[in-house]
Image (cartoon, grey):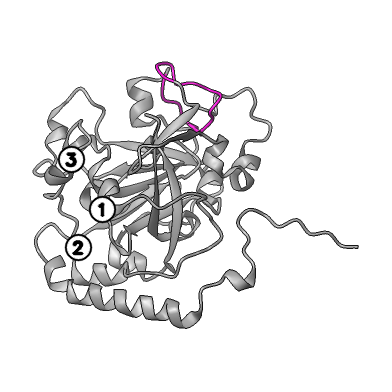
Amino acid sequence: MLIRIRRGWELPESAATPEAVVMGRRGALGAGIAAGAAALALPGLASPALAQAVAPAMRNPRYQPGREITPEADVASYNNYYEFGTSKSVASAAARLKVSPWSVKFDGLVERPRELGLEDLLKQVRQEERVLRHRCVEAWAMTVPWTGFPMSELVRLAAPRPEAKFVVFETATQRDTMPGLRQAWYPWPYSDGCSVAEARNELAFIATGMYGKPLPPQNGAPIRALFPWKYGFKAPKSIVRVTFQAEQPVGYWEKLQASEYGFWANVNPEVAHPRWSQASERLLGSNERVPTRIYNGYGEFVAPLYAGMQNQRIWY
């Protein structure tokens, strides 16, 4: 007799949302995007074309979050973006960020270095919505419906050469809109990276929106990286440059304090940060404390990436 054990992300066909309901929701949301297009044309905000490019996408049910979605207001008002200040309340300062026009440069060990306008880039990928958990190294967490596309698609567009083993993502430096850049003791521009193998993993994601809308500036508009199994400082915001290289990069926080912030930075409740425990996390919105899960609960997708790496500091 065949015994089949269902994986955590699988759902029975009966659980699928009826097509008419999904399409009705998309139509209503699409109308909302269109109605707000004129407002999105204001200086510093996404252009109408870009707003339409990140209009609500079909949700991918493969990545079940296992917890409630965090209220949008909490996600948009509590985050780190040191270019705009060191507090968690940077939304008003970040509103000055100029996100249109926007382009992303591909360089380093690639077949053809080039720069792509974001709207052109988005025409070459298929976007989807994923509800993903986000775990900050500071032990707070949120669950967000992100719009975007697999990071593997970005790697495909970049066409790295065989000797490229690592990827570096660099954040924008707008000196007229980012007051934090005046703090010269920080190693600007913000950058961090991953291995090419991690970037090609199905869970790695490039986000262009959240809650069915373009990303707000404080959350990394107009394009950011997401590694749901890693601590959040590994997810650069407002990406302007993607560099492929042979040597392992040193990220922004690793440059500042290598004893606390390492290259791999995978979530592990059993390995404490030097100054606090990682055994539990505080959920934004409810402030409930819950146990931290290894790889932030995504081990079935990413654990094989680290086979044979027991001697490396892969947890922080």
Q: Which residue is drawn at 24% across and 72% down?
A: 33
- Residue highlighted by disc 3: 90
Label 3: state its secondary structure.
Answer: loop
Q: Residue at x 79, y 59 (%)?
A: 4
Residue 272 screen position, x and y as percent? 49, 21
Q: Residues within 10 Å of mark 2 (few under 14, many from 20)?
A: many
In the image, which residues are magenta?
260-276
Q: Earlier in the sequence, mark 1 or mark 3?
A: 3
Q: Quadrant of residue 142?
A: top left
Q: Disc 2 residue type?
A: Ala
Q: How far apart are marks 3 and 2 (CA)?
A: 19 Å
Residue 32 screen position, x and y as percent? 24, 74
Q: Which residue is drawn at 44% across and 69% down?
A: 126
Residue 189 screen position, x and y as percent? 25, 36
Q: Residue 46 carries which label?
A: 2
Closer to the camera: disc 1 or disc 3? 3
Position of residue 97 in the picture relative to residue 141 (left or right): left
Q: Disc 1 residue type?
A: Ala
Position of residue 231 in the picture relative to residue 1 (left or right): left
Decide: is 228 above or below 211.
Answer: above
Closer to the camera: disc 3 or disc 2? 3
Residue 31 screen position, x and y as percent? 26, 78
Q: Earlier in the sequence, mark 3 or mark 2?
A: 2
* Residue 110 makes an appearance in the image: no
Q: Which residue is drawn at 34% across and 41% down?
A: 284
Q: Distance between the residues labelled 1 and 3?
A: 13 Å
- Residue highlighted by disc 1: 221
